[in-house]
């Protein structure tokens, strides 16, 4: 459909997945296909890539606890699982939901149109013999899929060839997954050459990357601080970005802690990591949209590189000499494209990798610039993506809060072992007595020095005492609102005691509640509060 001014009507989408699929097929794929994007960067996307559940990729050296981590999350063994101190997992295992428990071998997996793995066929039999899908009914797998990877080798073992490009396979997965978790062993922290190479291969996906320092219960607090510092230093050298990757410290398995000194830290870190993983289904559409934008920007750059090289080639003589010259001067071509088309340097592919790939290409067969293909992608980025973004927000609002359920996620959601239970503002939640009453005699002494009138102190009088805590006014203002239960602008002895209790909670490093919990409401105010509600 065209408008009177000759412009096409905007694309209309029923849902985000369908919108992404249509935009890719109609606007981005033609540009990729014309300028050999799939030979240089990444295979074409399939329908399953837009419909699949969020995926989590686990990467680490052998014996860092990758397979145990998956078992810990699901609280269930999965088919093909092997655990041990030696390199046990020698395959890529996609752990996915299925009605029946079983294993699908790699060669069968890459011909299944419902699975997002068809393009892995390009890595050949050596890889496919080391790839499988473990299917099983499990509550966690209803929301996410998990990819277990072979332990990355260290020392002499690196010299044994895997028979396929390990880093390239990981890069393929990294483009398609929602979260990449790098596991390190706190007990033996060494980053092998192959692991360094793998982390560099994942360089364009830092936004998906999280780091887990596992088995941290095997060392003392002092050693843990040193190991953490060494890990951050090593990662800084490899990733080479100013942003610091989020590191979660803990012991991710269902066994007693060997050194329990840091139990609280491990619990808090596990809770943060679980919340991060649980948010993946909610953010899946946004992640796919973000990846499509990244892909479109790279496809544009690819088109400009290919057409620039084509333009520089002689029509008859000296083609080989000119080709070598152009490859060696690729950096200058990058700069020229950058200035001519106002493209960010971060959008360009790795120059060394590009030079290697260009060596095997016939430049004379490269196509010339096709402005209509580029205009379609520009229109997609400028207009269609904004409409899809609005649709993402609509879908999020229409759907109930999506998060990963079951397995280890269920163990800390409620009851006395939920995170923070009985701490901070939750202290005394399961007690019959009012928890503030324990320290009320001490608070009463201060209360009566403030010369209460009719059993209450004014805001000005209470402020003089509350500011002694040195907490900022924004925090004290929130404490006042929570403590002034009857909203009369004064504090009686119970409300004053409550204010001091909340100050103590904050000074101990806990967060204040948004609303006063029932167990903290002063006993004399409970009946009136229930009536008001």
Image (cartoon, rainbow, N blue to C red):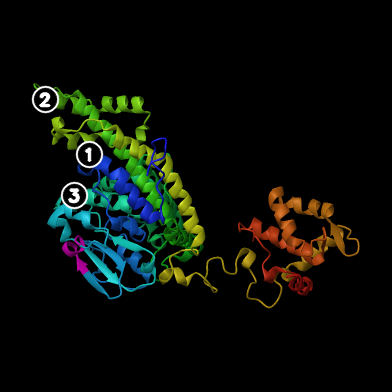
Comparing marks 3 and 1, which lies closer to the viewer?
A: 1
Residue pointed to by mark 3? 165
Q: Residues within 10 Å of mark 2 (few under 14, many from 20)?
A: some
- Measured Cα–Cα span from mark 2 to mark 1: 22 Å
Quadrant (top left, top right, bottom left, bottom right) of the N terminus: top left
- Residue extending farthest bottom: 432
Quadrant (top left, top right, bottom left, bottom right) of the C terminus: bottom right
Q: Which is nearer the N-term, disc 3 or disc 1? A: 1
Asked if residue 75 lies left or right of residue 327, the reply is: right
Coordinates of residue 509 in the picture (x, y in percent)? 61, 56
Coordinates of residue 272 in the picture (x, y in percent)? 48, 59
Q: Is residue 348 shown in magenta?
A: no
**Residue drawn where x is 22% and y is 30% of the image:** 368
- Residue extending farthest front: 4
Comparing marks 3 and 2, which lies closer to the viewer?
A: 2
Q: Which is nearer the N-term, disc 2 or disc 1? A: 1
Asked if residue 36 lies left or right of residue 378, the reply is: left
State which region is magenta: 104-111
Residue pointed to by mark 2? 319
Coordinates of residue 203 in the picture (x, y in percent)? 33, 43
- Residue 336 visible here: yes
**Residue drawn where x is 17% and y is 64% of the image:** 108
Residue pointed to by mark 1? 34
Numbered badge on residue 100: none
Asked if residue 408 lies left or right of residue 434, the reply is: left
Coordinates of residue 413 in the picture (x, y in percent)? 50, 70
**Residue drawn where x is 32% and y is 48% of the image:** 24
Comparing marks 2 and 1, which lies closer to the viewer?
A: 1
Q: Is residue 98 above or below residue 304?
A: below
Q: Residues within 10 Å of mark 3 (few under 14, many from 20)?
A: few
- Measured Cα–Cα span from mark 3 to mark 1: 26 Å
């Amino acid at each position: 459909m065209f408008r009177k001014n000759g412009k096409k009507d905007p694309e209309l989408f029923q849902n985000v997945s369908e919108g992404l699929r249509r935009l890719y097929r109609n606007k981005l794929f033609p540009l990729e296909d014309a300028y050999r994007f799939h030979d240089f960067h990444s295979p074409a996307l399939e329908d399953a890539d837009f419909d699949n559940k969020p995926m989590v990729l686990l990467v680490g050296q052998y014996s860092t606890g990758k397979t145990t981590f998956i078992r810990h999350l699901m609280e269930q063994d999965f088919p093909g699982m092997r655990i041990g101190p030696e390199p046990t997992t020698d395959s890529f295992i996609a752990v996915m939901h299925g009605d029946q428990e079983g294993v699908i071998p790699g060669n069968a997996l890459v011909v299944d149109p419902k699975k997002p793995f068809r393009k892995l066929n390009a890595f050949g039999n050596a890889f496919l013999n080391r790839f499988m899908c473990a299917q099983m009914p499990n509550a966690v797998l209803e929301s996410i899929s998990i990819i277990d990877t072979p332990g990355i080798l260290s020392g002499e073992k690196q010299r044994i060839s895997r028979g396929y490009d390990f880093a390239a396979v990981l890069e393929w997965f990294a483009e398609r997954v929602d979260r990449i978790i790098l596991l390190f062993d706190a007990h033996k922290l060494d980053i092998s050459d192959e692991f360094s190479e793998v982390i560099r291969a994942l360089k364009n996906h830092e936004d998906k990357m999280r780091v887990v320092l596992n088995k941290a219960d095997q060392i003392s607090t002092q050693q843990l601080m040193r190991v953490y510092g060494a890990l951050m230093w090593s990662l800084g050298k490899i990733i080479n970005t100013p942003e610091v990757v989020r590191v979660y410290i803990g012991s991710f398995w269902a066994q007693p802690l060997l050194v329990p000194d840091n139990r609280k830290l491990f619990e808090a870190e596990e809770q943060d990591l679980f919340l991060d993983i649980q948010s993946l289904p909610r953010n899946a559409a946004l992640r796919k949209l973000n990846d499509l934008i990244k892909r479109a920007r790279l496809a544009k750059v690819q088109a400009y590189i290919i057409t620039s090289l084509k333009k520089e080639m002689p029509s008859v003589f000296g083609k080989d000499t000119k080709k070598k010259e152009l490859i060696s001067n690729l950096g200058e071509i990058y700069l020229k494209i950058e200035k001519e088309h106002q493209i960010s340097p971060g959008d360009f592919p790795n120059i060394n990798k590009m030079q290697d790939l260009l060596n095997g290409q016939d430049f004379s067969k490269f196509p010339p610039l096709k402005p209509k293909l580029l205009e379609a992608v520009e229109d997609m980025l400028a207009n269609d993506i904004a409409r899809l973004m609005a649709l993402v927000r609509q879908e999020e609002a229409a759907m109930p809060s999506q998060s990963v359920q079951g397995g280890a996620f269920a163990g800390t959601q409620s009851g006395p072992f939920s995170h923070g239970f009985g701490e901070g503002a939750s202290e005394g939640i399961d007690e019959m007595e009012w928890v503030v009453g324990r320290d009320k005699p001490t608070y009463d002494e201060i209360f009566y020095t403030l010369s209460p009138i009719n059993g209450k102190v004014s805001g000005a009088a209470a402020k003089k005492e509350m500011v002694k805590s040195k907490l900022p006014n924004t925090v004290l203002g929130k404490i006042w609102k929570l403590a002034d239960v009857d909203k009369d602008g004064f504090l009686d002895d119970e409300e004053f005691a409550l204010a001091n209790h909340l100050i103590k909670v904050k000074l101990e490093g806990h967060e204040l509640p948004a609303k006063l919990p029932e167990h903290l409401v002063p006993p004399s105010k409970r009946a009136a509060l229930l009536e008001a509600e």
